[in-house]
Amino acid sequence: RCEVSQEPYKLKVIQLESGEIEIIGNRAGLKDLADVCRGLSELSDEEARTAANHYHLADYMNNAEEGSLELIILCSPDL
């Protein structure tokens, strides 16, 4: 994370009864998620084929709210 916001970031990933996945966040949390996605999207094809090609969001990693489902964001140049 490059910038430190005045507002603490908060993200939570839940599964609705319908089966849909919902990502809930305050502004700082959604901006942080966008930064993660932007950073992954800027990986070269070579970098995207290494272990640097993904990011974990999980409460046990202290980057998601308690009770959040684990979410892995993956850059796959071959998709």
Image: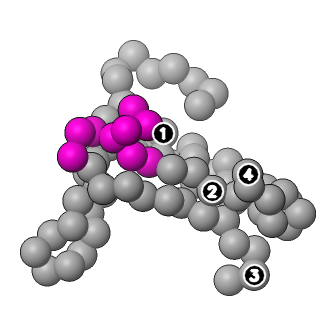
Asked if residue 15 lies left or right of residue 55, the reply is left
Provide the residue span drawn in magenta. Answer: 57-67
Q: Which mark is residue 78?
A: 3
Q: Look at mark 4 in the image and give the residue it sits on.
A: 52
Q: Give the mark nearest the N terminus, 4 or 1.
A: 1
The kind of residue tagged 1 is Asp
Secondary structure category for the residue under label 4: helix
Residue 71 x, y percent position in the rendering:
42, 58
Q: CA distance from mark 3 to mark 1?
A: 25 Å
Q: CA distance from mark 1 to mark 2?
A: 15 Å
Q: CA distance from mark 3 to mark 2?
A: 14 Å
The kind of residue tagged 2 is His
Which residue is nearer to you in this view: 7 or 79?
79
Rate crowding at label 1 as few (under 14), some (14 to 19) or many (20 or more) other CA atoms within 10 Å.
many
Q: Which mark is residue 54?
A: 2
Q: State yes or no: residue 46 in magenta.
A: no
Q: CA distance from mark 3 to mark 4?
A: 16 Å
Q: Give the mark nearest the N terminus, 3 or 1.
A: 1
Q: Quadrant of the C terminus?
A: bottom right
Q: Which mark is residue 32?
A: 1
